[in-house]
Amino acid sequence: MLHPAAMALLNHSFSQGWADPNKLNNNSRQTAILLQQVRQKFAELLDVRADEIEFLGESDLGFELGISGLLKPENQLIYSAIDRQRVFAIAQSHEKNGNKVDCLPVDKNGVINLSATTEKDVLVWQVANGETGNIQANPKSQALIFADCTASGVDYLPEFKYHTALFDSKSWQGPAGLGLLIIKDAEKWRNPSPHNDFSRSLGTYSIPLAIASSVALEAYLSDTDIRAKIKKYLMEFISEQVSDVDIASTENGLSKYLSCSFANVESDRLLLALEQLGFAVDSGSACKSADMQPSHVLAAMDRPIVGNIRLTLHKDITEQMVVEFCQALKISVEKLRKN
């Protein structure tokens, strides 16, 4: 869901076009200055330095750059069973090349069981989960750390030392197609993609999207936020008014995500029933929900994967909308269980 402030800017930006900031003409210099201002705004709001930010035309590319950029053959790659599929793919490739990997288990609340690490390890640390919203404690580790901030965004900035990190514009209702790779320790990172210069990323990002994303982030932070109250209401209603339900999300996690599973209900039928009543929810793995594959996150947490739905709560949601959704959910679950 794109923030209205970003939408208004994009309509204007795409119509006027943008000069290449690397050229020497006047329009290019103006674009370069504007981009530097945008970079500085991101730095201020994400609590990083401007020179630590790299814009990416695809946020998923940041996993490869951020993780593999820290990895060397002698490094063990440590990640968790609830990480994104992109992380799994990097780990699989590292292991196929004869290198060590370690997949960490989690408990029923999704808390990662972090074992002892050394300076020769690279640790992937998910700040918060994109399905349940559950937040991880700060890791105590000697390893080089890649912080996955794609779900947490600006709602919960990492409070620990990391070497690289990845943010996704969509996490603050910015436009899709823009990621922000943070490189904190340039001496311990190198560009893993083929290149013959000193570039740190591919540089193939949209200038209008970068500008719109910064506008969305600023507006997102200024918006009224009652989602914590709404999430609490939802959790209490579901647990009290609907039988045989398992809620995988914790109340103190990110307020924008809620995951729950209903026994004796098929996820796809529940999604369709709610859609007919005017409510859009998701199911399956957040990495690839379109094909309705069971959630590897819930499986790793030893939670039910059948009858699961995921709610994404935006800041413009109202209490009345939530009350209406709760009634629709209760009616839909009861109806599906009778059929």
Image (spheres, rainbow, N blue to C red):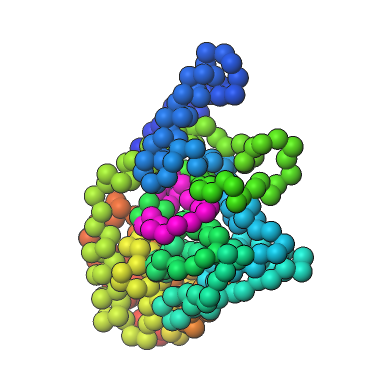
Q: Is residue 156 left or right of residue 59?
A: left
Which residue, as the protein is rendered here, is positioned at the far top?
A: 26
| Residue 81 visible in the current orientation | no
- Picture coordinates of residue 267 (x, y %)? 48, 74
| Residue 190 visible in the current orientation | yes
**Front residue (pair 243, 148):** 148
Residue drawn at x 54%, y 41% is 54
Residue drawn at x 28%, y 60% is 227
Magenta residue span: 156-174
Find out whether residue 326 is within the magenta segment.
no
**Front residue (pair 277, 142):** 142
- Picture coordinates of residue 133 (x, y %)? 40, 66
Q: Quadrant of the C terminus?
A: bottom left
- Picture coordinates of residue 295 (x, y %)? 53, 73
Residue drawn at x 65%, y 58% is 71
Q: Is residue 159 left or right of residue 121?
A: left
Find out whether residue 158 is within the magenta segment.
yes
Q: Is residue 178 above or below residue 37?
A: below
Q: Is residue 247 above or below residue 83?
A: below
- Picture coordinates of residue 148 (x, y %)? 50, 58
Which residue, as the protein is rendered here, is positioned at the far right?
A: 97
Q: How many marks?
A: 0
Residue drawn at x 45%, y 26% is 34
Q: Is residue 178 above or below residue 323?
A: above
